[in-house]
Amino acid sequence: MMVAENTHSRLFLLFLFSLLTLSTSPALSLHPEVQSTGYPTTATLDVSATLAQAHLALSYRPPASTELPSHLLPYDPSSAISVSLHSRDFLPSYAGSAAHGHPDYKALTLARLFRDEARVRSIGVRATLAFGAVADSVLNPNTDAEALQFAAVNSIMGSVISGASMGSGEYFSRVGVGSPPKPLFMILDTGSDVSWVQCLPCADCYKQSDPVFDPSDSSSYTLVSCNSSLCHSLVLSACRNSTYSSSGPAAAAADERCLYQVMYGDGSYTVGDFATETLTFGGSASVSEVPLGCGHDNEGVFYGAAGLLGLGGGPLSLPTQISARSITYCLVDRDSNASSILNISTAASTPSSTLMAPLLRNPLLDTFYYVELMGISVGGNMLPIPPSAFAIDESSRTGGVIVDSGTSVTRLQKAAYATLRDEFRAQMEALPPAERMIPFDTCYNLSSRASVQVPSVAFHFPEGKALLLPAKNYMIPVNDEGTYCLAFAPSPVAFSIIGNVQQQGTRVIFDLVNDRVGFTPDMC
């Protein structure tokens, strides 16, 4: 009898111990897919401050001048190139600045989202073309020089051949073009390779803030011959005998000159002569013989820019041409009229506080900068998304995560986005929902609150490194009334994109020598 009682007692103690273990062990859970990261579970969203910033952006009246503001940082001699970046909504008033032209913040937001959707579609079409999904015959330019130079190209599919949609280039800089340098506002874009400006004579030029560049005024403007390696590096090119080149130092050589054609997914395009030219940055740093398109036929929603500076990873981009070792930029809030800084350096250096992750390259899409992303956490818990969802597949045709300065809203593969959205919604049940605004489907009415705690969101990289996002980098206002939306969206393309809203306030470094991407929070 005593033995039986002792046996029952031992069994009862074992049962109690098993319950205690089940309730305290981190390895056991009713939801085994949830893994704690040890990072904060919530972040504070300052509703009052972000709404006030949005109202300032809407009421801002850009100066009627194309001169650079005096507060811009001077040229950094430690960098080969150092320039200031400006949000497109804070350019001089006749530069096509958008903020002051909208009746309310919702209208401004819709304009931004429209540009962003065009941008993402453009990147997707570029990928499709690179993967060989479209017949070459569709893409070959019209070899009739007059048609290539002057005719409308609407009959060609709306596609990206180089770079991404100009309609969504969100950051501009002042660049001197030619000798002597003519200051022009240009879009700076890490998702493009071919640099170009509008040129005289104009067959069709859109309105820009500065006088259109006249190559005949530059002593360093030199046309590229059709048989040159630069011409062969273009995705779309054609040849033509020189008939309307400048008569001064920029006169063409006797052989045929190279014509370029760049088209974008929103219907924008530029067509003209391909040349080399001297560019001046920060008022003192000059780079000679930079490949530059001289566009005589240009159309699109370019919002006052004279052209584009390609900062991608392809052979014709500015960083590749000057053998840059690193590209560094820091984007301030797009609702702020403060300037950001971009450096292209021949010496790679990073602050000790920088989070470094592997920089990946896709041989089929060498323009874009990929980062190795391992996962995403919401509320301090890792989402059940396998790392393979963010990896480039063996064929290089799908997957991967691009870090892009021109895309605004981060796009995730559809399954990954749905997982993030559902977990975020589950942790936000206490807050009142609001009407969605495409592409956002997770919005909240925060009009009655000065601040609110929201689930934390972090990007996770190899070796246990993580970038914890500020709340204002993923919960953004979309109108004047206090509606905020989760600034993520499903990707319509075969890969994910980390956009500039999530990058705001973080110094991003592309270490091109050691193949690393760096993120340094609060370094603008």
Image (cartoon, helix red, strand yellow):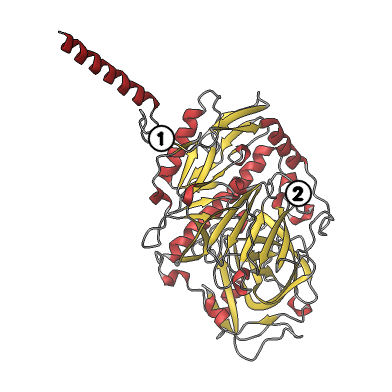
Q: Choose the circle earlier in sequence order: 1 or 2.
A: 1
Identify the residue at the far front of this view.
2
* Residue drawn at point x = 40 percent, y = 69 percent: 135
Tell me if residue 340 can be seen.
yes
Circle 1 is placed at which residue position?
A: 34
Percent from the top left, x then y, of residue 261?
Answer: 57, 71
Q: Is residue 305 above or below residue 63?
A: below
Percent from the top left, x then y, of residue 443?
Answer: 55, 32
Q: Amino acid at mark 2?
A: Ala
Tell me the crowding category of disc 2: few under 14, some 14 to 19, or many 20 or more residues within 10 angstroms, Cα based: some
What's the distance in space between the residues labelled 1 and 2, CA to CA? 40 Å
Identify the residue at the far top of this view.
1
Percent from the top left, x then y, of residue 149?
Answer: 61, 74
* Residue drawn at point x = 71 percent, y = 86 percent: 251
Circle 2 is placed at which residue position?
A: 338
Rendered image quadrant of residue 471: top right
* Residue drawn at point x = 52 percent, y = 57 percent: 122
Tell me if residue 439 can be seen.
no
Percent from the top left, x then y, of residue 332?
Answer: 69, 48
Q: How many dots with numbers?
A: 2
Q: Amino acid at mark 1?
A: Val
Q: For the residue labelled by badge 2, is the local secondary structure a helix, a strand or a loop?
A: loop
Tell me the crowding category of disc 1: few under 14, some 14 to 19, or many 20 or more residues within 10 angstroms, Cα based: some
Identify the residue at the far left of this view.
1
In the shown orientation, is residue 443 left or right of residue 374? right
Rendered image quadrant of residue 99: top right
